[in-house]
Image (cartoon, rainbow, N blue to C red):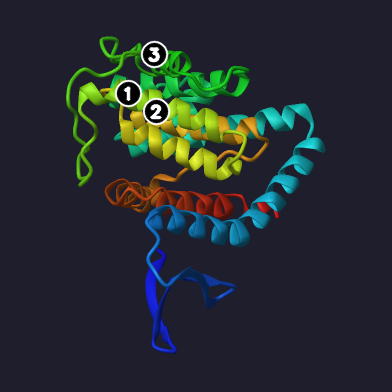
Amino acid sequence: MASIKKKQAWKQEYYYLEHSFRANGKVQKKELYLGKEMPKNIEDIKKEFINSIYKEKFYSIIEKIKKGYKAEIAHMPKSAFEKETETFAIKFTYDTQRIEGSTLTLRETANLLEKGITPKSKPIRDVKEAEAHKKLFYEMLKCKKDISLQLLLEWHRILLKETKANIAGNIRKHQVAISGSKFMPPFPAEVYPLLKEFFRWYGKNKSKMHPVELAALVHLKFVTIHPFADGNGRISRIMMNFVLHKHGYPMLDIPYTRRDSYYNALQRAQVKKTDSIFAVWMIKGHIKENKRYL
């Protein structure tokens, strides 16, 4: 995080922003001069300062990943590409469902979604929601529309219609809490105004912001609104991959093994109201998970 520092010269005090980060195994420092007085819009300046640092540090790597990804796809036979997509769909379904409490193992998820083999002694809800998530994933891939409330309600309906028909495709009308989190989601009366604000933000930024940062913030902002009684995390991760896929970047699977780190980044961003915390976490994760394309 950027911190405010004071320096003295010729009996005058000057304000600076300072941010330290690790690059190529070394700690580096960036400074931004603010002036003799603290700017009133200091929080906006902090965000832009941090944004400029990760643009410089990460975005060139991400663009190399995109280039390598597109080159690999261009030389891949159709059958191989379809198999690669199915492998991702299964792993993504396993991880996103497991993060939300599913008891299915990766092997059970693969057997179910590839061969139709239903695991024994596992909750039928876990089975049906894994099948529904895979269906939703492929619906997302072929979707030509842009994100809208109508589209997200339809995606939510697809995800939960077999297991929680009473809430599938519906905005919540009651207060919810996130187990183990210090963040309290908005009250029901706030949800629609916040969704309206979200889509206004998305429309304004979808052509300006780097697509990987946009994907991260779409996820963060939507899951923070928490408009559904259940399924918010899964829908927000589908939205994240929709943005990445639409802009030609490799999609991101957040592994279940990184669940604690993922939830911590979300909670810190939500409690501190600092989007860049989660954006940096996801950008780093995207690079880590797609290093093979470099």
Return the residue at label 2. 197
The answer to whether the residue labelled 2 contacts the one labelled 1, judged by CB atoms less than 8 Å apart, is: yes
Return the residue at label 1. 193
Which tag is nearer the camera, tag 2 or tag 3?
A: 2
- The Cα atoms of the two marked residues, 2 and 1, are separated by 6 Å
- The Cα atoms of the two marked residues, 3 and 1, are separated by 21 Å
Relative to 48, say whether 148 is above or below.
above
Q: Nearer the viewer, residue 178 or 225?
A: 225
Residue 109, visible in the rendered structure: yes
The answer to whether the residue labelled 2 contacts the one labelled 3, judged by CB atoms less than 8 Å apart, is: no
Query: Mark 2: which secondary structure?
Result: helix
Q: Nearer the viewer, residue 215 or 80?
A: 215
Q: Amino acid at mark 2?
A: Glu
Query: Mark 3: which secondary structure?
Result: helix
Give the label on residue 157, or none.
Answer: 3
Q: Percent x, y for residue 209? A: 58, 42
Q: Amino acid at mark 3?
A: Arg
